[in-house]
């Protein structure tokens, strides 16, 4: 059964929140403004009904735009809002009937796969041309009619189009930045895997070469010096046993590490993933404690890169403790220690404590000893 990763769940949740925010903020402006325009610019109930229809079309367009599904109903929305504008100019005498069209059009045009600029020019020209036809049915002054029905609606259309094109460019840039950040995080994790593979090679590569030489030597000595051959085989056995122990320690993050080196490595990995890092040194870390705290830092670094959507990380060092705080923690139930669970048991055996908590979008990993670690 396929399950979504925490990163995918977090991204889907963020998109849902952004969609709801877009709908709420835009409708909070469109509906009151549209209501005021209808109240002040309609003299009969049927004129008001047409203008209400235009506002409803604009609301539907906003909702579908926020759901990235506006193009599926673009033609009906454009046709309806354009008809409201034509009605307002030639029949109703409503100078604000352009309201619906100058919402729907700027929402649709930047979404087009191509010919966006020609479409924007065509929309602006249509608004101006329809407004100018008011001269055919109006007895007012030419300048006043053109200002009210052509210049003002055209200016509103141009401003709204400019805003929506800028909005589209902003969201496109944000998407590209997020994609780049994900790629950097994946690269950082890949580098960590390479580092792990390098350490594994350091442990096993030399050992296997020595084992090969010693077994070949024992094979030659078995008939001429059985005692020496037996000694070589005992050394091979001890060497293999020590290598198995070191491999287990590496696999379970129990190999002795240098905290200073782990700090530098974590800093480089986070910066490569586009995550800001701040290191606070409250005191000089105890030597033995530093080895265990380095293991906590390494495992936490990997968890942040793989499972969080972090923008910043703060690492605080004390004499017998370390605290790593990162934002971008996805919503959910109590955090799982996973790879840290083995370290928690080992720290407990050394008189220490490892805790992992999540609060207000922050993930806090803290490891501390009550006193110096026994050597």
Image: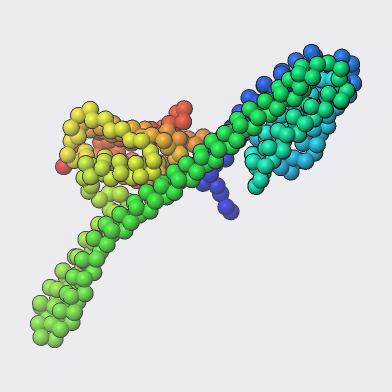
Horizontal side of residue 200 vs 305, given as left or right: left
Q: Position of residue 66 (x, y in %)?
A: 65, 35
Q: Nearer the viewer, residue 33 or 181?
A: 33
**Residue at 51% from the left image edge and 34% from the top image edge:** 331
User: Most extreme residue toward the front, as rendered?
Assistant: 142
**Residue 168 makes an appearance in the image:** yes
**Residue at 28% from the left image edge and 33% from the top image edge:** 279
Horizontal side of residue 310 vs 265, given as left or right: right
Q: Nearer the viewer, residue 54 or 233?
A: 54
Horizontal side of residue 69 vs 324, given as left or right: right
Q: Position of residue 31 (x, y in %)?
A: 72, 21
Vertical arrangement, residue 137 with respect to residue 304, above or below? above
User: In the rendered image, which quarter contains the C terminus?
Assistant: top left
**Residue at 65% from the left image edge and 47% from the top image edge:** 114
Q: Position of residue 280 (x, y in %)?
A: 26, 30
Chosen colour scheme: rainbow
Q: Nearer the viewer, residue 155 or 301?
A: 155
Q: Quadrant of residue 46?
A: top right
Q: Quadrant of residue 141?
A: top right
Q: Position of residue 247 (x, y in %)?
A: 28, 58
All told, the count of numbered labels is 0
**Residue 48 makes an appearance in the image:** no
Q: Nearer the viewer, residue 317 or 272?
A: 272
Horizontal side of residue 26 vs 135, given as left or right: left
**Residue at 30% from the left image edge and 44% from the top image edge:** 268
Q: Quadrant of residue 30?
A: top right
């Amino acid at each position: 059964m396929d399950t979504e990763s925490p990163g995918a769940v977090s991204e889907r949740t963020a998109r849902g929140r952004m969609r709801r925010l877009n709908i709420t903020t835009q409708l909070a402006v469109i509906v009151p403004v549209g209501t005021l325009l209808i109240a002040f610019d309609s003299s009969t109930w049927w004129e008001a009904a047409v203008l209400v229809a235009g506002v409803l079309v604009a609301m539907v367009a906003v909702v579908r735009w926020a759901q990235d599904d506006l193009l599926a109903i673009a033609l009906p929305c454009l046709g309806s809002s354009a008809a409201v504008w034509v009605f307002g100019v030639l029949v109703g005498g409503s100078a604000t009937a352009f309201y619906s069209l100058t919402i729907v059009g700027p929402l649709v045009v930047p979404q087009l796969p191509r010919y966006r600029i020609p479409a924007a020019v065509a929309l602006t020209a249509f608004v101006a041309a329809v407004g100018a036809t008011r001269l055919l049915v109006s007895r007012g002054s030419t300048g006043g009619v053109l200002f009210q029905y052509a210049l003002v609606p055209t200016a509103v259309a141009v401003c709204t189009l400019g805003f929506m094109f800028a909005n589209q460019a902003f969201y496109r840039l944000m998407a590209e930045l997020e994609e780049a950040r994900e790629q950097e995080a994946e690269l950082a994790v890949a580098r960590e895997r390479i580092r792990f593979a390098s350490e594994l090679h350091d442990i096993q590569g030399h050992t296997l070469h020595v084992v090969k030489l010693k077994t070949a030597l024992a094979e030659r000595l078995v008939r001429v010096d059985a005692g020496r051959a037996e000694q070589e085989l005992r050394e091979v056995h001890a060497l293999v046993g020590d290598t198995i122990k070191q491999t287990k320690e590496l696999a379970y993050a129990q190999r002795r590490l240098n905290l200073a080196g782990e700090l530098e490595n974590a800093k480089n990995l986070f910066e490569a993933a586009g995550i800001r890092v701040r290191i606070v040194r409250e005191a000089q870390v105890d030597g033995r404690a530093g080895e265990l705290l380095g293991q906590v830092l390494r495992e936490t670094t990997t968890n942040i890169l793989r499972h969080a959507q972090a923008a910043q990380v703060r690492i605080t060092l004390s004499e017998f403790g370390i605290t790593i705080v990162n934002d971008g923690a996805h919503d959910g139930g109590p955090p799982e220690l996973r790879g840290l669970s083995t370290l928690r048991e080992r720290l407990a055996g050394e008189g220490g404590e490892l805790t992992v908590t999540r609060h207000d979008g922050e993930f806090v990993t803290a490891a501390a000893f009550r006193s110096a670690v026994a050597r």
